[in-house]
Every structure is written in C-alpha cells, then in structure tokens.
Amino acid sequence: MSTGTFTPAPGRAPMRAILRRQIRMELVLTARRGEAVVLAMGVPLLVLLGVGLTKATNVPGDDRLGYVVPGVLALTVMSTAFTGQAITTGYERSYGVLKRLGASPLTRPGLLFSKTAAVLCLVALQVLALALVGVAAGWRPELSRILPAAGVTILATAAYCGLALLLASLLRPETVTALATLIYVLMMAAGGIMFAAPDLGTAGYFLLPLAAHAEALRDTLTGGTAVPGAVWLSLTLWAAAALTAAARAFRWE
C-alpha cells in the first residue's frame, strides 16, 4: 500500500455537478406533486378539448384550433413556470427547505438557475404533449416555424420563473398561492386564450406577457409568419426585469 492512497481530499463538488443534481431533484419533486401535474396539464388540456372542439366561445376567424391550440400552449407555460413555481417555492421557503439549501454548496444564483432549467425541461415535455393532442384533434402547425416559436417560449418561461421566484420571496405562502392563482385566472381571461379578447394593440404585449406569447405562437405555428418585433422586445424585457428582481430580492428564509 503506497503512501497517500487514503489521503482525504476535502472540497465541494464542481458547480456543474451540483447544478445537475439540483435540477434532477427539482424534476423528481415536481413529478411527485399531483396538484402540480393537474394544474400544468389538466386545465390546459380541458381548455384545448373543450374550446377547440366545440363552439363554446367565439374566436376570430374560421380556424378554431389554429387560434385555441397556440393559446393553450402559452397557458401551460404560464401554469408551470409561474403559478406552480411560485406556490412551490413559497412553501419551500416556509418549511425551511430553502434555508437548508442555503447552507449547502448551492449558491443563490445556482438555485435560481436550477429551478429555471428544471421548469424549461418540464415546459418542453408539456408543450410537446399538448401539441400532439392538438395535432390529433386536427391542428396543422407550420413546422418550419418551430425555432422562433421555441425562442419566444424560452423567453416567456424565463419571465414567468423570475416573477414566480420574486413573488415567493416577498410574501407568505398562503398569500402567494392566492395571488398566483388570481393572476393565472385573470391572464387566462384577458390573454385571449379561450375567446377573442379586446385588442390592446402593441401596448397589450407589454402589459400581458401571456397575450404576447400566445399571439407569437399563433403568428408562427398557425400563420407561418414572423414573430412581431414588439413581442420579442416585450418578452425580453419581462424576462430580464423579472430575473434581475428575483435575484436581488430572493431570500433563503
């Protein structure tokens, strides 16, 4: 036995390994929460089938599925990245989970990155599943416009994650649950998801990120046209402002 064979080598794992393990843990915990799955998939699926296949609401134009399905895809992004994320993080802070993570090698930026990355993974799976349901129901998307659609979806996800983490850092979990759910319902009603909403013009993109995201997906996946510049700018500003505010205000306890 040579000298130094069992010499201890203390030190934390590489940050890449820490982030990978935290992202995996976030995904596992989310999969175990039944209410999160219902919120993320159940409600958008009911809206897609109930509104897309019936004449329960009035939508502009003759292509009902072409209007409803992109709106539902935007809705599921918000339900996962904002509502679900805000409620989960709020209770994690209340129960002391975040406080214990704060004592680990995981830094605050590392936690924010891990949560956002985990949500992006979930959003990708959910959007794919709902898009396949839409195709089975008769929706025919423009496959050549998937890249810009993915780009605006990533921006929208980042914006919602930032807003969720900011909300969870400032308020009690019970308040976060009520407020996040209220915002979700109001956005769904005013964002033109189930029916034609009042046209607020370009200003509406900056006031309602869900409306901007839904309109961008309709332009690309249904219409085959480019994403309006105002939508790119709106979602970029929302993402940058929300993530910056969340990084500054985030608290471990």
Image (cartoon, helix red, strand yellow):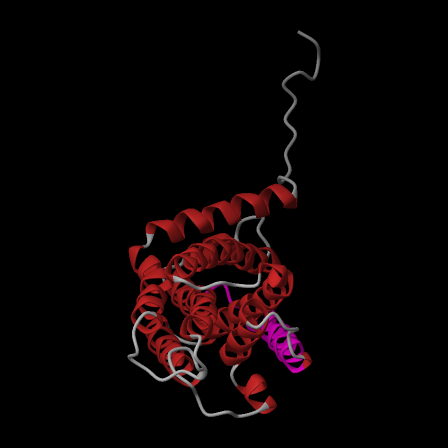
| In magenta segment, residue 128 | no
131 to the left or right of 3: left
Q: Residue drawn at (63%, 64%), measured in percent from left and top?
A: 151
Q: Residue furthest right?
A: 3
Q: How many marks?
A: 0
Whether the magenta-drawn stretch holds residue 232 is answered as: yes
In the picture shown, does residue 4 fall above or below 167? above
Image x and y of residue 95, in percent: 36, 60
| Span highlighted in magenta in the image | 230-253
Left or right: where 242 falls relative to 88: right
Along the viewing direction, whichever of 188 and 22 lies nearer the viewer? 188
Percent x, y of residue 29 = 39, 50
Residue drawn at (71%, 13%), measured in percent from left and top?
3
- Comparing 32 with 137, the one in front is 137
Quarter assignment of residue 235: bottom right
Could you tell me residue 82's position as x and y percent? 46, 69
> Residue lying furthest top in this view?
1
> Compared with residue 54, is residue 9 higher up or lower down, i.e. above or below?
above
The picture quadrant where one finds residue 45 is: bottom left
**Residue ID at (65%, 29%):** 9
Quarter of the image with the N terminus is top right
Dominant secondary structure, magenta? helix
Of residue 8 and residue 180, the one placed in the foreground of this image is 180
22 relative position to 135: left or right: right
Task: Please provide percent x and percent y for residue 181.
Answer: 35, 75
Viewer-nearest residue: 204 or 47: 47
Residue at 54 percent across and 87 percent down: it is 207
